[in-house]
Amino acid sequence: MKNFIFVFSLFAIFLTVNAAQFQLNKRAATFQRCPADNYKYDLLTVAMHPDPLISNETAQFNVSGTLTKNDITLDKTVLRISFADMKHLPPISDPYFKTFNKSYAAGTPFSIYASDVSVPTLPDLYHIIVVVGVPTDNPNITFDIYGCAFASVGSAVSFK
Ligand SMILES: *[C@@H]1O[C@H](CO)[C@@H](O)[C@H](O)[C@H]1NC(C)=O
Ligand SMILES: *[C@@H]1O[C@H](CO)[C@@H](O)[C@H](O)[C@H]1NC(C)=O
Ligand SMILES: *[C@@H]1O[C@H](CO)[C@@H](O)[C@H](O)[C@H]1NC(C)=O
Ligand SMILES: *[C@@H]1O[C@H](CO)[C@@H](O)[C@H](O)[C@H]1NC(C)=O
């Protein structure tokens, strides 16, 4: 349920900006900064294989970046990768999680490699949402997001 709420709220944000500014890429995923006030989420760099993803298969993600304000803490901070249908709720699968096995102080470049991300059955138009942060006990904010990137992928050229 927490996962659902998390993706739902991100998804709601995306819906509002989608039509205006996102160019859908026919082939490869282009990851960009997640919308948020004051650029509060650091931008992550995401390399993904295969690209485009293949439904029902496993993919590899290499996520790197530098968090400006938050530390990454061994056994606490997690990488989270989720998929959302642009046209329908709820999210199309449970998110993938991987916990960091190394600490990185804020300002230090990090990378984390996920070799076993299960790709769901993908719709025509979908978002890939990659987040680094920490799950919380607060039911209102299930996840503290530190870094984020997302890609809009689809077979259509425009989406309104
Ligand atoms: C992941 O990306 C980092 C930073 O670009 C790089 O140093 C590392 O070799 C990459 N790891 C894999 C498994 O591709
Ligand atoms: C952390 O995980 C990576 C990739 O799974 C592995 O190469 C590395 O040795 C691990 N580091 C520690 C400190 O366990
Ligand atoms: C993926 O799995 C779903 C459910 O098992 C199936 O309906 C669908 O045809 C599969 N898609 C591909 C491309 O294999
Ligand atoms: C969650 O939100 C509700 C309604 O806004 C508020 O009353 C409650 O105090 C919040 N809980 C926490 C733990 O912040």
Image: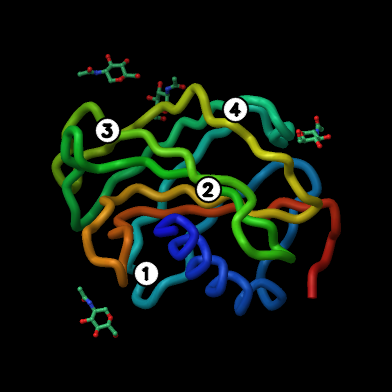
Q: What residue does disc 4 label?
A: 59
| Label drawn at residue 157 | none
Provide the secondary structure element on which disc 3 rests: loop
Q: Amino acid at mark 3?
A: Phe
**Quarter placement of the N terminus:** bottom left
Q: CA distance from mark 3 to mark 1?
A: 24 Å
Residue ID at (71%, 51%) = 153
Q: Residue furthest front?
A: 1
Q: CA distance from mark 4 to mark 1?
A: 29 Å
In-image side of 105 versus 62 (left or right): left
Image x and y of residue 9, in percent? 48, 70
Image x and y of residue 49, in percent? 61, 27
Q: What residue does disc 1 label?
A: 39
Q: Is residue 82 above or below residue 99?
A: below
Residue ID at (59%, 46%) = 93
- Asked which quadrant contains residue 158, the reply is bottom right
Q: Amino acid at mark 2?
A: Ser
Q: What residue does disc 3 label?
A: 100
In-image side of 10 versus 97 (left or right): right
